[in-house]
Amino acid sequence: MGSSAFYLPLGDDRYVSTEHTGGPWSPDSQHMGPPSGLLTRELERVPTGLTDTGSGVPPSIARITVEILGPVPVAELRVRSSVQRSGRSVELLSAELSAGSRPVARALAWRLTGTDTRAVAAGAGDPLPSPEQAEPQFAKPEGWLSGYLDAMELLSVRGGLGPVGPATLWLRQRVPLVDGEPPSGLQRLMTVADTGNGASNRLDLRHWLFINTELTVHIWRVPTGEWIGLDADTAIGPNGVGTATSKLHDTDGPVGRGAQALLVRPR
């Protein structure tokens, strides 16, 4: 598949974007899955100042919001992070992705101190049918470009990329996020979560645009394994605004929820 990862590290917080990051509409702009994963990687690398509760449970990122400031070019990028709000039990982290001097995306994340709540865990919901029970989706929709889509293995439980309506999919990376290292569970989750909008479209792509301006993911459990499940649907209002929502899974069950604000308009 050419390059070995979505990004090749250059050092000094800089990365070369490979052809695998390309979005479905332009070979020059990235699908937001890989940039979301790269921002998440940077957030995870911020040292924590949270108090150790003695539970043996490490701190967890509970929510990540990625604000899309413009098209992310398939080019050299720089990512930097900081602590916006420190505390003993919670801390607010931020990361920024830039192309040259232009910021193209920002992320904010709440990281919370760890506590053992296994005895009272509830409300997550039922698991999806396993990847072994799903069907491969071999063909891209007409007019969609390679890049990210070819770098992901995609299985359909119902619906899929192209057909109009809700969709339930399993996705797995064919390449790492950053060359030379395995992605974390949270990085895998965020690399997939932005696909909810495209998977659950309710409009004919030949006649309508539905562009997400952000991605917000709440996480109650870090996923394990390579497969990420996406159970997605879209609601469209009467004023050119919509919301794509996704319940996110690993093969053991639900791990979180994602949402994307959509700009909806005719082409």
Image: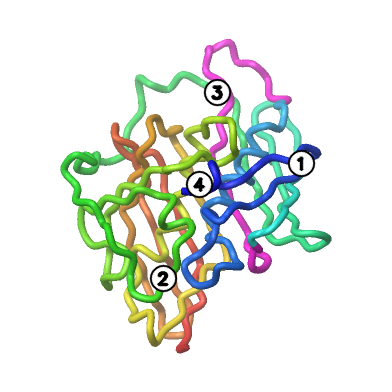
Q: Is residue 69 left or right of residue 29?
A: right
Residue 32 image point, x, y percent = 55, 58
The amino acid sitting under disc 2 is Trp
* Real-space CA distance between mark 1 and mark 3, rounded to the nearest whole angstrom: 28 Å
Q: Earlier in the sequence, mark 4 or mark 1?
A: 1
Q: Earlier in the sequence, mark 2 or mark 4?
A: 2
Kindly give the residue lying farthest to the left in the view shown.
133
Other residues around mark 1 within 10 Å, as few (<14) / some (14–19) / many (≥20): few
* The disc label shown at residue 144, or none: 2
Could you say which quadrant of the image residue 85 lies in? top right
Q: Is residue 266 left or right of residue 228?
A: right
The magenta span reads: 49-73
- Asked if the residue at tag 1 contacts the one at tag 4, i.e. Cβ–Cβ closer than 8 Å, the answer is no
Helix, strand or loop at disc 2? loop
- Residue where numbered disc 4 is placed: 190
- Residue where numbered disc 3 is placed: 114
Q: Earlier in the sequence, mark 1 or mark 3?
A: 1
- Asked if the residue at tag 3 contacts the one at tag 1, i.e. Cβ–Cβ closer than 8 Å, the answer is no
- Residue where numbered disc 1 is placed: 13
